[in-house]
């Protein structure tokens, strides 16, 4: 069974699709609807298929003694509750405004829910849900999302194969079969040596029915190399944080891509898509027909011969072009004799031969 991920009636992704790029604005809007719209427009104009936000409240995501797990040189807040409390100001009406704006400019609206109320807010707004790596064992949240019967992206940072299998089994229990698995490393930022992009191939092997994607937290370079590698390895859904200022301190700006980075990746991925091609089972393509004919060989008479002569191995040689009997029949035709006179370098055809009666 080929892996697929059906986003809507109009769009179903397969392992041979162009990348579906999600620009994760997250909370880089810093609680400003106007800034969020600005980032949405930049993502759209740079080639993203979707933008994604994060929907949470500080008091439902972290206790007040939950410590930081990010680079505190870039984001100095040492307490999770305090950080989340800075950016949890959007309400349902704000997400509706952003959804409507996305619909207007034709880019998919997404947001990751971090609590049960967020699922209810987002259900009428999103085409599919994203489950954060941090919630892969949060069964109450997974069940609530699965019951919406919308497609699901399952992020797998800091998880084990058993945890991934358990989450997928739980999702399927509630009749949700469209699950894409996102390779992810839960470091902010992720060092290149820790990106472990080979896990993409491992996930494709372990879960052949599920499309695989990549949620990236590495620092972007000028060519978006890690995203190129991920797509080349088979990650069809590509998600990366998005900002309008990578130099800004705090939150997720420091490991985000900007519009220039996004444009670069779209350009590079289009090239990769084109060179990977559309034929996925080995066979020759139409442009190779002339090469099959002129660069391959036929069996050729190596001396002047007359009708009735028996063919021996010393009488034949293999030369280009491939307009006669293929060289794979070299040993077989020594059992034949000629039905007509042939000059040296004549290309042998089956119609020139008859079986030796002796």
Image: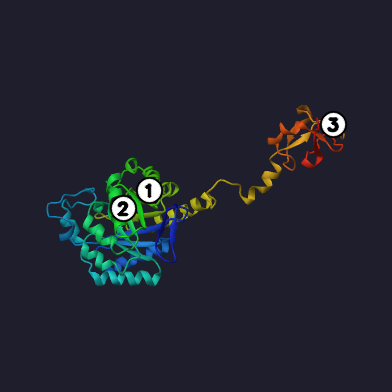
Q: CA distance from mark 2 to mark 3?
A: 72 Å
- Residue 122 placement: quadrant: bottom left
Q: Is 223 left or right of 25, judged from the image as shown?
A: right
Q: Quadrant of the C terminus?
A: top right
Q: How crowded is the residue under tag 3: few (<14 C-alpha within 10 Å), some, or many (20+)?
A: some
Decide: is 33 above or below 266: below
- First of labels 1, 3 by sequence position: 1
Of 254 and 118, which appears nearest the observer? 118
- Farthest-out residue, left: 65
User: What element does badge 1 sit on?
Assistant: loop
Would you call the spot at circle 1 few (<14 residues within 10 Å), some (14-19), or many (20 or more)? Answer: some
Compared to residue 155, the image places residue 352 above or below, namely above
Q: Nearer the viewer, mark 1 or mark 3?
A: 3
| Residue position for label 1 | 207
| The disc label shown at residue 168, or none | 2
Q: Earlier in the sequence, mark 2 or mark 1?
A: 2
Left or right side of 150 for 330: right
Q: Is there CB contact under 8 Å for labels 1 and 3?
A: no
Indicate the secondary structure of the residue bearing disc 2. Answer: helix
Observer able to see residue 182: yes
Write the residue at 45% across / 47% down.
Answer: 232
In this rendered view, identify the residue nearer to me: 23 or 246: 23
Q: CA distance from mark 1 to mark 3?
A: 62 Å
Badge 3 is on which residue? 309
Return the disc, 2 or 3, that comes first in the chain's sequence.
Answer: 2
Foreground residue among 114 and 221: 114
């Amino acid at each position: 069974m080929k892996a697929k991920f059906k986003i809507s009636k109009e769009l179903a992704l397969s392992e041979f699709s162009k990348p579906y790029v999600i620009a994760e604005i997250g909370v880089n809007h810093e609680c400003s609807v106007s800034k969020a719209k600005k980032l949405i427009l930049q993502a759209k104009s740079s080639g993203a298929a979707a933008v994604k936000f994060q929907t949470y409240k500080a008091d439902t995501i972290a206790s007040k003694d939950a410590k930081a797990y990010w680079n505190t040189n870039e984001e100095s807040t040492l307490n999770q509750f305090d950080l989340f409390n800075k950016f949890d100001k959007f309400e349902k009406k704000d997400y509706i405004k952003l959804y409507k704006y996305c619909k207007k400019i034709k880019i998919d609206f997404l947001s990751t829910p971090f609590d049960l109320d967020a699922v209810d807010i987002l259900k009428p707004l999103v085409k599919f849900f994203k489950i954060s790596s941090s919630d892969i064992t949060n069964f109450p949240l997974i069940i609530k999302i699965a019951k919406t019967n919308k497609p699901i992206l399952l992020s797998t940072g800091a998880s084990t194969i058993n945890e991934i299998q358990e989450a997928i089994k739980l999702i399927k229990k509630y009749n949700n079969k469209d699950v894409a698995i996102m390779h992810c490393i839960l470091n902010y930022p992720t060092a290149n040596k820790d990106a472990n992009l080979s896990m993409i191939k491992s996930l494709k092997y372990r879960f052949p029915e599920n499309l695989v994607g990549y949620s990236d937290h590495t620092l972007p370079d000028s060519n978006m190399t890690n995203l190129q590698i991920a797509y080349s390895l088979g990650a069809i859904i590509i998600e990366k944080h998005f900002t309008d200022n990578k130099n800004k301190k705090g939150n997720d700006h420091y490991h985000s891509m900007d519009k220039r980075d996004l444009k670069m990746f779209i350009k590079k991925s289009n090239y990769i898509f084109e060179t990977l091609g559309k034929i996925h089972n080995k066979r020759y393509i139409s442009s190779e027909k002339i090469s099959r004919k002129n660069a391959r060989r036929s069996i050729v008479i190596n001396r002047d011969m007359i009708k009735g002569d028996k063919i021996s191995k010393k009488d034949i040689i293999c030369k280009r072009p491939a307009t006669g009997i293929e060289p794979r029949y070299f040993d077989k035709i020594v059992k034949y004799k000629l039905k007509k006179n042939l000059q040296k370098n004549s290309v042998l055809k089956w119609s020139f031969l008859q079986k030796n009666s002796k």
